[in-house]
Image (cartoon, rainbow, N blue to C red):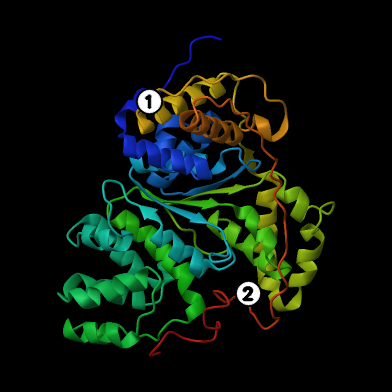
Amino acid sequence: MPPVAVPPVVDEFTPLECRRALEALRSGVPNREAVAILGCEQPEIERRFDAILAGAAGTSAAPGDGGGMLVSGDFGSGKSHLLAHLEHLALAQGFVCSTVAVSKETPFYDLGKVFKSAMENSRIPGHSGRLIEELGQALDPRSDRYGDFFRWADNAAASGLSPMFPAGLLVHERLDDPELNREIEDFWAGDPLRKTRITTGLREIGQLANYSFRAPKAAELPPQRLRFMSELIRAAGYAGWVILLDEIELVAQFSILQRARSYAELARWFGRAPGRPDPGLVVVATVTEDFALEIISPDGTRKDRDYIAPRLADRYQHLSGPAEIGMRILEHEAVPLGAPREDDVPATIEALRRLYSTAYGSEAPVLPLPSRGAGYQNRMRYRVRASISEWDLRRLYPDYNPRIEGDEFRYRYEEEAETEEGSDPGDAGADTPTPNSQSPDS
């Protein structure tokens, strides 16, 4: 076998950091140290991602345009590892990054919950604090970019925002009230805020006569918050906002109506839904490679291509167009994750061996890498976890000669029961007020 080039970055981490990286790899959820050490050989996806970042940052021929990319791959093929790598690349280019894992607690059809998760699970270049607080401190009312931001927010025809947003921004700028400023920032980040708190602030700065508004409806707020935050991030001096959506395939567990809403949300995140785009917003989503065939195709188990449109007829017709766009994205636009090349495997395992040796202060043995056959044993996830397990056993039981075996995991697309017909897809979710309800103190 030819010599293997091992990334020298392994030597930059402490034993504790190496142990953390090992535990992340053992659980199948790589952290930043693991990604930095093992690297990520996906040149075509990186090229596309760099082009999207350039557009979002205004350094390409299409200034200010964000974009979306869907990546597909089998279970254990490295999709989460890729997202962590793309996050590292985006942070280095001055983008704020948020990672959201689709789940029952963060259902993809509920924009309000996905937005809050993005706010809570974010990283900022050069900072480690809470996103909304860091952004609030970074705003400079004297800067040209802040002036452009305020004029945009204050122009409802251009921004599509409730006057509560520019009114709150003005109070945040002019009133020296830390408690109220924190409440306003939390409102931007997804928390409720009484209208009277804003009007009290406006009165104190002598601007109450210039802002007359009602409290926005609950269902109106999530898309407005997403649009406002995309612009706020750029006004604070960052290149844009990268949102990494992991495990889109979990929408298969939802009812047909919730899946339809999820497809419509995918169109929104990718900037394809009707309405105003969110400049500076970059979205990368991952999905299992057989999702479209199993769930959307007329030949699959759910046949959403046949059943979604009739399900949305009449009462939910407004979702039909965006849902169709979302299904087309899943069917035709996924970029497949490249399989590891022959020389990638020994390089990765050797880097992993050095990581293990540093973590435990003793030299881990070189493991033979015979052909492992087809299926799950060829996946990098299996090779990584099998190697860690074998080193563990050899370290704890020096005289033992282990043989690692595994069972293939097959993702099962299971559907939950249909929700009540009274749950309007226009709502922000089952746990939020109905679309006709307004924020407190309307």
Query: In the image, which disc is placed on residue 352?
Result: none
Q: Position of residue 142 (x, y in %)?
A: 17, 60
Q: Residue furthest front?
A: 399
| Quarter residue 321 falls in | bottom right
Q: Does 272 appear above or below 79?
A: below
Most foreground residue, 422 or 26 = 26
Q: Position of residue 181 (x, y in %)?
A: 24, 73
Quadrant containing the C terminus in the rendered view:
bottom left
In front: label 1 or label 2: 1
Most foreground residue, 230 or 15 = 15
The three-letter amino acid code for the residue at tag 1 is Ser
Q: Position of residue 71 (x, y in %)?
A: 59, 43
Q: Residues within 10 Å of mark 2 (few under 14, many from 20)?
A: many
| Number of numbered discs on residues | 2
416 left or right, relative to 110: right
Which element is circle 2 on? loop
The three-letter amino acid code for the residue at tag 2 is Pro
Quadrant containing the N terminus in the rendered view:
top right
Q: Does 16 appear above or below 236?
A: above
Q: Does 312 appear above or below 193?
A: above
Q: Earlier in the sequence, mark 1 or mark 2?
A: 1
Judge whether residue 25 can be spotted in this image.
yes
Which element is circle 1 on? loop
Q: Residues within 10 Å of mark 1 (few under 14, many from 20)?
A: few
Query: In the image, which disc is placed on residue 362?
Result: 1
The residue that label 2 is drawn on is: 425
Most foreground residue, 239 or 401 = 401
